[in-house]
Amino acid sequence: MLSRLPAIATSLAFIFCFFLASNRAVQAKERPNVLLILVDDLKPALGCYGDSHAKTPNIDSLANRGMRFDMAYCNQAVCAPSRFTLMLGSHSTSTGLYGLGSQLRQIIPDAVTMPQHFAEHGGYRTESLGKIFHIGHGNHGDPESFSVPHFKEKVIEYLEPASTNGGQLTREEAFFTNQMLGQIKSLPRGAAFESPEAADEDYADGRIAAETMKRLRSAKQRRQTDGTPFFIAAGFARPHLPFSAPQKYWDLYDRNSLPMPKHETLPVDAPKVAGKRGGEISNYKPVPTKPNAEFGGDLKRDLIHGYYASTSFVDAQIGKVINELDRLELSDNTIVVLWGDHGFHLGDLGIWTKHTNYEQANRIPILITAPGVTQPGTSTKQLAESVDIFPTLTELAGLPSPTGPQPINGVSLVPVLKDASARVRDHAYHAYPKRKLGRAIRTEHYRLVQWKPIDGDEAPIYELYDYQTDPLETKNLAEDRPDVVKRLSKTLASYPDPVRRNR
């Protein structure tokens, strides 16, 4: 009998493992699919957010299916760090991943990203298309996050030869393709906008939509065959500069009726470190290159027109994907999330693009449709952050909550998805590194920004804005309302000390 014990133990172990594997397979068959739609530089300039100028019927329709978060914020208003916060559930101040060229696996080699978590704990096949992690500026994305190779597409793209001085490599093309990174200033500037007569698939976002639809068809077949749920992340480039979109999307707008910036000077009494002039937009022609140069009225209108046209272009591509999801009868078992990686200044405060701690750079759209959980056409004033998406989706999918090894700063929004009046946090947190690090607390009423070196004992500098009385951020009220500064500073002090900047 004793001689048979090892064989019995081996058999029992095999049966146990077989049972676990079978149980996981059964659970996987019951899990919802996930479609994560990421849109670059998308602010809430959308019909569903009350922008009467925006022509965004497909995103508006998606909002009508589930919940719209009216006070959602990114955690850092720049592409690569913002996408790290989404995929890790971690603030940049918790990881040190502050830069466009930050290397995830060098800094946190064993990080478990959202798609990795879904694959490991839920048996999901995870796929990525377009701009998911930031690729460019020395960064090559994160292939380890997905089950199959990434479907890469262009972010900077032109069809008209005049846009690139006859086909030359432009500065931003070089940045986003990791070419000649040490010689950027020697390269010509590409056009800030173009509007050719072109088909949607002549541009990257059209091709991403087509490939995502193809992947959905394959995913349905796979689910029917072996029960494997899908996690598909589709990333769209527009309305990121350049505003390259087919003419038909420009034609949707009367450029003379589009909203022009209402306040074009930096806030009174704001610290110099908080402001911005020039930057990314200066790499495009015909934008002035001097930091304090004035933008002419026609240029402002062209840029604003281009942003809205590009938003309508990406809206049409998202509509194709959602229509295919419906056609395949996958909608009833697929969680859909639409997320903008950060906002975008369109001349407000005299600022263009992002890279600030102000409202227009940090407020984002978040739309969530979760069958059986969300009610159609609902909205909430719950303050939400990018880091909240990871724990929210894991709870919706019935997976264990994420535990890292990276710090998990997000909270699940599921109670809010079930009841729009529920509250899981009373503020949002974000940060932006410059010569000093600006860390911010955004409540429904105020934003406090503390500027302080990461290292050293230098006294902090504060900004305070009241969005009930001054939604355009015309004046820093920190000196006028020390009681509010003191109260919100205590909230900021509850966060861990920021991690040093890592590359």
Image: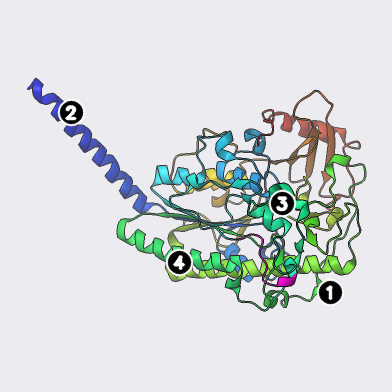
Q: Identify which amino acid the numbered label 1 is placed on.
A: Asn
**Based on the displayed image, in which of its 4 quarters is residue 68 positioned?**
bottom right
Up-down: is 332 above or below 142?
Answer: below
Q: Is mark 4 on a helix, strand or loop?
A: helix
Q: What element carries label 3?
A: strand
Q: Earlier in the sequence, mark 4 or mark 2?
A: 2
Of badges 3 and 2, the one in the foreground is 2
Q: Position of residue 309 (x, y in %)?
A: 71, 70
Up-down: is 372 above or below 466?
Answer: below
The residue stretch that appears in magenta: 154-162
Q: Distance between the residues labelled 4 and 3?
A: 32 Å
Q: Earlier in the sequence, mark 1 or mark 4?
A: 4
Disc 3: which residue: 363
Q: Identify which amino acid the numbered label 2 is placed on.
A: Ala
Disc 1: which residue: 256
Is residue 394 visible to the viewer in this orientation of the structure? no
Disc 2: which residue: 9
Q: How far apart are marks 1 and 3 (CA)?
A: 26 Å
Q: Is mark 2 on a helix, strand or loop?
A: helix
Q: Are marks 4 and 3 in contact (CB under 8 Å)?
A: no
Q: What element carries label 1?
A: helix
Q: Identify which amino acid the numbered label 3 is placed on.
A: Arg
Disc 4: which residue: 214
Q: Do the residues labelled 4 and 2 touch (CB within 8 Å)?
A: no
Up-down: is 401 above or below 47?
Answer: above
Q: Do the residues labelled 3 and 2 touch (CB within 8 Å)?
A: no
For residue 498: magenta?
no
Q: Distance between the residues labelled 1 and 2?
A: 79 Å
